[in-house]
Amino acid sequence: MTLIESPAIRWHGDHLELLDQRALPLATRWLRLDNANDSADAIRDMVVRGAPAIGITAAYAVVLAARALGVKASRETLQPAFAVLAASRPTAVNLFWALQRMQALCDIDGIELVDRLAAEAIQIHEDDRAMNHRLAAFGVPLLGEGKRVYTHCNTGALATGGHGTALGIIRTAWAAGRITGVVAGETRPWMQGARLTSWELLQENIPVTLVVDSAAGHVFKGGDIGAVIVGADRITANGDTANKIGTYNLAVLAKHHGIPFIVAAPLSTIDPALANGDAIEIEQRSAAEVRNIQGVPVAPENVPVFNPAFDVTPAQLISAIVTEHGVIERPDTDKMAAHLASAGNPR
Ligand code: MRU
């Protein structure tokens, strides 16, 4: 039986397994998924998270739906599965990119379509890891030599098909002896930095220091941060970048301290259909995520809460965007378009 695996996603040919990232680092628990509805719930509930990993999961979820339909699989019969997956999380464009790639293959029916969709999902999964390694090679020279790197959220093997985007660059830079370590912001409210990034780095003996998000300014002032490097959930035609809430704060702080601010993302995260970041839908999540930490109340139960999952960093604050195709320094609309064109306009 087929087994295609990466640290957070296992495809078994007839079902999907996801590492339950909500339980990390305290427990390693895999959830079995047999249909598209449960897969959409897993994306919404943060079992799997990170833009590329969400896209890979959605592609496999389409295969689960197609397998259930068998000879009846077609563009029309798969429509409910595409719709439920598209409604799971709104901001990361990789989800919609993967669904569009799968949908584009639906010009045949039946078992032939099921097989074709399965091959495509595996391709999306395997390509992502390879892309991350290419992206890392382009990104390493952008990190200040002999200094630490500051990162936010989790952009590692757990968030992708393996290796990671921003964290992949960090891994490669550490292996090359270019950086001295990492400072990870804890990333309230889901604590991706505390629970996932520090866990991934410790496993590889890469020196990491965890700080609360509000310590960033103080840390930057200290003078030993050579670069801030983050991932992205959607990059618009002009280079504006949606990423985990708090990223914008870091970009402003980095500018003030003269620290390069780098965004690392595959081409599948670029959405040239949106002119700028104002058009990006920002996911709003529940008040309970802010009123509680790991289920423990930390605020009055009736306090009004605003809980945007992402913010948008204007392109003017970004020193460089790194993709698997190269580096866009000081991104703007013309440079983004030229980058996509030279990559063969994949989007
Ligand atoms: O809410 P999450 O954990 O899915 O948010 C993840 C991020 O913001 C990541 O930085 C982004 O998806 C890039 S992951 C390579």
Image (cartoon, rainbow, N blue to C red):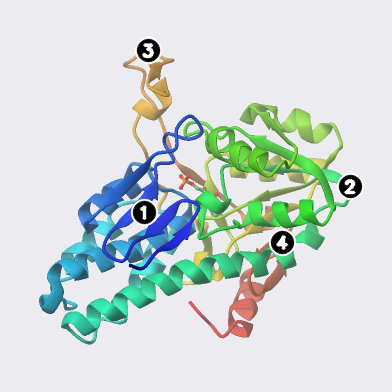
Q: Earlier in the sequence, mark 3 or mark 4?
A: 3
3D distance between C-alphas at marks 1 and 2: 39 Å
In what element is the residue under mark 4?
strand
Q: Which mark is residue 300?
A: 3
Q: Is mark 3 within 8 Å of ligand 1?
A: no
Q: Which mark is residue 90?
A: 1
Q: Is mark 1 within 8 Å of ligand 1?
A: no
Disc 1 residue type (three-letter): Pro
3D distance between C-alphas at marks 2 and 4: 20 Å
Q: Residue at x 52, y 46 (%)?
A: 311
The reply to whether discs 3 and 2 touch (Cβ–Cβ < 8 Å) is: no
In what element is the residue under mark 1?
loop
3D distance between C-alphas at marks 1 and 4: 25 Å
Disc 4 residue type (three-letter): Ala
For disc 4, the marked residue is 320
Residue 196 located left or right of residue 294: right
For disc 2, the marked residue is 146
Disc 2 residue type (three-letter): Gly
Of the two numbered discs 1 and 2 in the rendering, the one whose residue sits closer to the viewer: 2
3D distance between C-alphas at marks 3 and 2: 45 Å
Q: Nearer the viewer, residue 288 or 205?
A: 205
Q: Earlier in the sequence, mark 3 or mark 1?
A: 1
Residue 201 percent across, percent down from the top left: 66, 42
Q: Earlier in the sequence, mark 1 or mark 4?
A: 1
Q: Residue furthest left?
A: 72
Q: Earlier in the sequence, mark 3 or mark 2?
A: 2
